[in-house]
Image (spheres, rainbow, N blue to C red):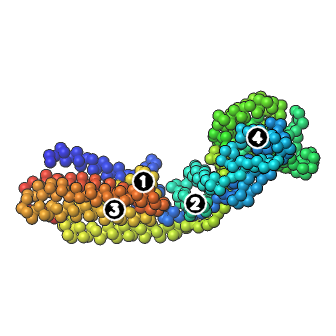
Amino acid sequence: MNRTGLWIRTAIIIAITLGGIYMVFGPRHTPTSADFTWAGIKENLSKNINLGLDLRGGSHLVMRVKTDDYLKKLTENNAQAALSAAQDAKLPVTGNSMTTDPGNYSISLALSDPSQAQAVVDEVRKKVDLASWTQSTSGNNVTWSLPTQTATLLKRQAVDQELKIIDSRINAFGVKEPTLQRHGSDASGEILLQMPGVDDPERVKNLIGATSNLSMMKVVSPPNPSPVQTYPTKEAAIQSLGGTIPANRRVLPYADRDEPTSAGASSTPDPNKPKQYVVVEYPAIVDGSELRDASAASRTGADRDYEINFTFKPSGAQKFGDWTGKNIGNYMAVVLNDEVKSAAYIKSQIFDQGQISGRFTKQSAEDLALTLKSGALPAEIEYQEERTVGPSLGADSIRSGVEASLGGLALVVIFMLFYYRGAGINAVIALILNMILTIAALIMIKSTLTLPGIAGLILGIGMAVDSNVLIFERIREELRLGISIPESISIGFDRAFVTIIDTHVTTIISSLILYMTGSGPIRGFAVTLILGLLINLFTAVFVSRTIFNWELSLWPNREKLSI
């Protein structure tokens, strides 16, 4: 090979090597003199690599989704919605009943005129999604029952939705490379969550389990009250309803404050004022499922005066706009988790946005906005198992893994130098470069290094050694046949390359299957091994051959090759 081609190959190797070294050991900020000390290099390395739970420490949680409670709540909501739909249509429905035993969920509407049963069914179908429920009529009752197969499907969907919501909350919270997946059988409804390097696990747990049942409800009060009609006790609010709470009413707590002048805004509450109660209409005008976005914003720049701004999806905005247009002069309650956060006076029709105000800190406002934005958990969760991996255990694991890697590398280096002599130096350079570039690739794709990942790194070293052995032995064979050194090197690389590709491709395919079917640690092993094998094609073939070519270029008439 001519010198120009060699210099081009060398420039490529140097550029990639320097880039890999910087990715592994370089700072992610403007470099200072401290970054080039031994302590600074070690600190940069620890910051650049994302360590898994087994190395960095963190929290291990197993949660169970209360799917039976989810179906119970779904049945109750559908029962009330069905009753409201029939009564709004002035149909002869006298009441509703329901069954919410595990495995047996049903809704019944009682009719004073059985001849109107079909009209009731038609009206309920327009406003309530009961398409998957089995409908039947018996005497004065119209009944919808939830089939077992549909209940199983709804439970599975609830767990899937919980996974998506928890994933969005954890990712937005900033936990690096969490492991989130189903745990156990589908019927168990369990979820596994591992969070490496969590500084405040309790906050994460609170955020995971936080409910975000946001809804807008009409406040029941006399026309144009000022301020909004409130009651000093819950009992007083119930008495205003005649002593019992009708199915279409709710009595909710409300922190008294100066009333706003337009929907969706409120002033800061006075914490010294006593809690009061308001009566609201049920069901809600719109709920949290109609939210498109939510964000925290400072009202005055103070740390304890934040509000949450939210916007609706088009469907929610239309319902909200229709309702506010018909209720100008009334009050609307912003209800969060069964507590009225603000009562807005409807001054004009509004469609797509609103606010929740109060004495929120920056952290509490951001957490609440995140909870609202990610959506309400369809069912409550309970913790089945909780384990914490301390940083000391992680440090021991790191030390053991590093010692194993360095020990294996040292033995390989000694063997290669002893058995292949001068060519062994070539192999050692390729091995060290393989390790650096593999770690750099892990950093570039923001993958997490775990103990199985270190095992994959060590196995990659073994595969890299195997590639060098194949090439060197092939070169030896050609030299024994009396072929010249340049031609032996060329034939050795060309013919060994086919075998190297074969072994690497089959191993990569196996690793891809592990990645697609395995859990977090297994996937970490697969990722590290795949990267190591791909990079080995560069180091064991391209880099190693370039070094041999430089030898031939510098000593073209040599009669022996140290191999």
> Dot 4 corresponds to which residue?
118
Residue 554, position as x, y percentages in the image: 13, 53
Say which of marks 1 and 2 sits in front.
2
* Residue at disc 1, secondary structure: helix
Say which of marks 1 and 3 sits in front.
3
Closer to the N terminus: mark 2 or mark 4?
4
Say which of marks 4 and 1 sits in front.
4
Question: Compared to 346, does 174 lie above or below?
Answer: below
Which quadrant would residue 83 be assigned to in this image?
top right
> Dot 1 corresponds to which residue?
443
* Residue at disc 3, secondary structure: helix
Q: Are marks 1 and 2 in contact (CB under 8 Å)?
A: no
Q: Label 3 sits on what residue type?
A: Gly
Q: Using the numbered discs, state the Cα–Cα distance from disc 2 to disc 3 in whole angstroms.
A: 36 Å
> Dot 2 corresponds to which residue?
186
The number of callouts visible is 4
| Residue 368 visible at all | no
Q: Label 1 sits on what residue type?
A: Ile
Closer to the N terminus: mark 1 or mark 2?
2
Closer to the N terminus: mark 4 or mark 1?
4
Residue 338, position as x, y percentages in the image: 77, 49
